[in-house]
């Protein structure tokens, strides 16, 4: 108590000055309308900025929860879209066959960089080797096929887009696979060209092109696109078709990396054949 009294005595002039300044400010802002309005506006501005900063900080730390909720919503869309059974399990989706044997897993990712107007387009996702992602894994969007993983480091992966001249995928149309060319010709961001199919095949405008049984990277029945044009050359027995991708690559923000746990063992069988 004596130390407190000594402190007050030692700093009496400063404390009295501060007290008088506070009283003067209180009287000025309460007895003068202009100063009162100015102070109120300033206080409101400061309070608003504080709340905005607080909201942004809270929102930032809540992003993980929001992302999980969004990925769950996308997973539910998958259940309605694809013939396989897809169950959202923590940070993966398990894709099962009719007798509940797990065939694939799908890891949710965010697209952090993307191109769609180049000859060889790629996009980068925010997960890599630390999350179980490796080279040659298929990538699908909430709508359908998006690409194939080219390379991965610990936390990021580069994906070859479906809009890439090096992309190879076997189309499956009306219950039949066609070992032919599905080409990106850099003419339209969401269109591919399908060549080498006999004109006698029963393929119509609007038919959907899917992934088939020949790919180890994708489950069967994932949509690639739909037929929008059929060009027939009288001098050839083959037709050229245009396909519009179901994935909108201009707005690609979320995707799933397909993990085939049996890929290496199955691929070795093909290599030894």
Image: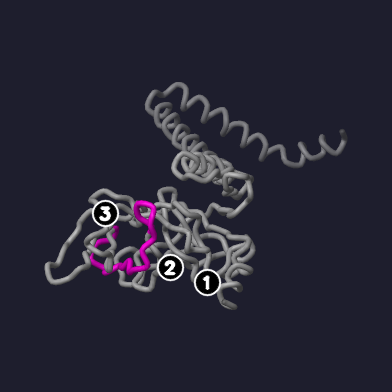
- Let me know if residue 57 appears in the view: no
Q: Earlier in the sequence, mark 3 or mark 1?
A: 1
- The outermost residue toward the left is 234
Checking the image for residue 203, the label placed there is none
- Tell whether label 1 touches label 3 (CB within 8 Å): no
- Tell whether label 1 touches label 2 (CB within 8 Å): no
Tag nearer the camera, 3 or 1: 3
Q: Nearer the viewer, residue 167 or 73?
A: 167
Residue 21 vertical position relative to residue 108 in the rendered view, above or below: above
Checking the image for residue 202, the label placed there is 3
Q: Nearer the viewer, residue 40 or 34?
A: 40
Residue at disc 2, secondary structure: strand
In which image quadrant can residue 199 be found?
Answer: bottom left
Residue 234 x, y percent position in the rendering: 12, 67
Tag nearer the camera, 3 or 2: 3
Circle 1 crowding by C-alpha within 10 Å: few under 14, some 14–19, many from 20: some
Which residue is denoted by mark 1 in the rendering?
151
Say which quadrant the N terminus sits in: top right
Which residue is denoted by mark 2 in the rendering?
160
Magenta-colored span: 172-190
């Amino acid at each position: 108590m004596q130390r407190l009294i000594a402190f007050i005595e030692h700093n009496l002039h400063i404390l009295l000055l501060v007290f008088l300044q506070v009283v003067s400010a209180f009287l000025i802002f309460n007895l003068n309308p202009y100063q009162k309005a100015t102070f109120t506006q300033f206080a409101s501005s400061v309070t608003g900025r504080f709340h905005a900063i607080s909201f942004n900080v809270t929102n930032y730390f809540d992003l993980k929860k929001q992302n999980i909720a969004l990925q769950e919503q996308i997973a539910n869309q998958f259940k309605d879209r694809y013939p396989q059974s897809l169950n959202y399990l923590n940070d993966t989706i398990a894709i099962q066959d009719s007798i509940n044997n797990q065939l694939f897993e799908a890891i949710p990712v965010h697209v952090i960089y993307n191109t769609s107007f180049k000859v060889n387009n790629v996009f980068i996702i925010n997960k890599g080797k630390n999350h179980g992602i490796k080279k040659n894994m298929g990538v699908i969007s909430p709508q359908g096929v998006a690409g194939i993983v080219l390379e991965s480091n610990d936390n990021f992966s580069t994906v070859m887009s479906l809009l890439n001249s090096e992309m190879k995928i076997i189309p499956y149309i009306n219950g039949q696979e066609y070992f032919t060319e599905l080409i990106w010709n850099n003419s339209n961001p969401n269109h591919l060209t399908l060549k080498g199919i006999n004109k006698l095949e029963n393929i119509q405008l609007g038919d959907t092109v899917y992934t088939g049984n020949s790919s180890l990277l994708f489950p069967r029945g994932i949509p690639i696109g739909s037929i929008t044009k059929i060009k027939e050359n009288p001098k050839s027995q083959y037709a050229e078709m245009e396909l519009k991708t179901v994935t909108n690559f201009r707005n690609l923000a979320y995707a799933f990396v397909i993990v085939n746990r049996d890929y290496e063992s199955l691929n070795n069988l093909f290599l030894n054949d």
